[in-house]
Image (cartoon, helix red, strand yellow):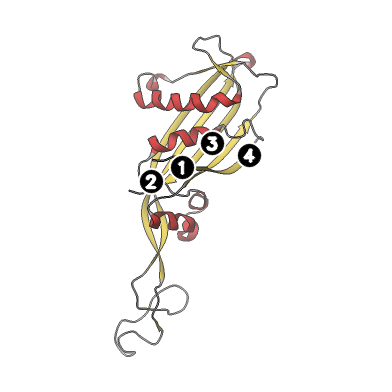
Amino acid sequence: MLKILEPIRALRSGAPRAALVLAALLLSGCVSTISARVTSYQRWPGNVQGQTYRIVPDAAQRNNLQYQSFADMLRAAIGPTGLVESHTSSARFDVGFTYSSAPMQAWVQRFAPAPYYYSGPGWGGYWGGYYGPWGPGYYGGAAVVDVPVPAYRNTLTVTIKDKSNHDAEVYRSSAVSVSGGNDLQMLMPYLARAVFDGFPGNNGQVRDINYPMDNY
């Protein structure tokens, strides 16, 4: 089973060659790192060390067991920021989050069966006919071709609002990773960690973050 793919280049463009790094990971079947692209915006106030927060689900999420599981992962990721969780309405910061795992199409490069014929830009050639069984451009090696493969775009978005400042949004961060299967449960601890990596960071910052994969 393919566990996780490099998302960065696959997300930049819809062109077939936008996912060349994705290719090696698809073909290998497993990787030792997990990658995410993180985009963050912040107007973080000063002197908030030790201030309290609470996670506030919307109405549809209150009795959702998956949401509750992901909330626990988010709590672990928030810990290093210095904020302290409170379960009362007196908490200064309200934290909300949304997540999704959407199917998409990625492209990988694979070796075509040898022998092959190279006929100029792109791969192609003759199989029999005037030039004989392989055509005039026969080579004994293998061609590389772009192949479409199913993939999933996994996203976590976290927002923090400051109740002491009229519920102003003071932090928003999204982490995106691409996987070969519906692996959101496995990815969520890493996405949550990525959202708070280097917190609060620079406003409008976009980063590519890599983590070693735990034994899985």
Query: Regarding mark 1 in the picture, which secondary structure is present there?
Result: loop
Which numbered disc, 4 or 3, marks the residue closer to the eye?
A: 3
Check disc 4 and report the residue beneath it: 205
Q: CA distance from mark 4 to mark 3?
A: 13 Å
- Residue 124's quadrant in the figure? bottom left
Q: Earlier in the sequence, mark 4 or mark 3?
A: 3
The residue at the point 36 percent across, 86 percent down is 135
Q: Residues at badges 2 and 1 in contact (C-beta under 8 Å)? A: yes
Say which mark, if any, is on residue 190.
none
Q: CA distance from mark 2 to mark 1?
A: 10 Å
The residue at the point 47 percent across, 75 percent down is 121
Q: How many marks?
A: 4
The residue at the point 39 percent across, 19 percent down is 62
Q: Amino acid at mark 4?
A: Gln
Asked whether, in this view, residue 25 is left or right of residue 80, the answer is left
- Circle 4 crowding by C-alpha within 10 Å: few under 14, some 14–19, many from 20: few
Picture layout, residue 146 above or below residue 4: below
Check disc 3 and report the residue beneath it: 194
Q: CA distance from mark 2 to mark 3?
A: 18 Å
- Residue 132's quadrant in the figure? bottom left
Which numbered disc, 2 or 4, marks the residue closer to the eye?
A: 2
Q: Earlier in the sequence, mark 2 or mark 3?
A: 2
Q: Earlier in the sequence, mark 2 or mark 1?
A: 2
Q: Earlier in the sequence, mark 3 or mark 1?
A: 3
Q: Amino acid at mark 1?
A: Met
Check disc 1 and report the residue beneath it: 213
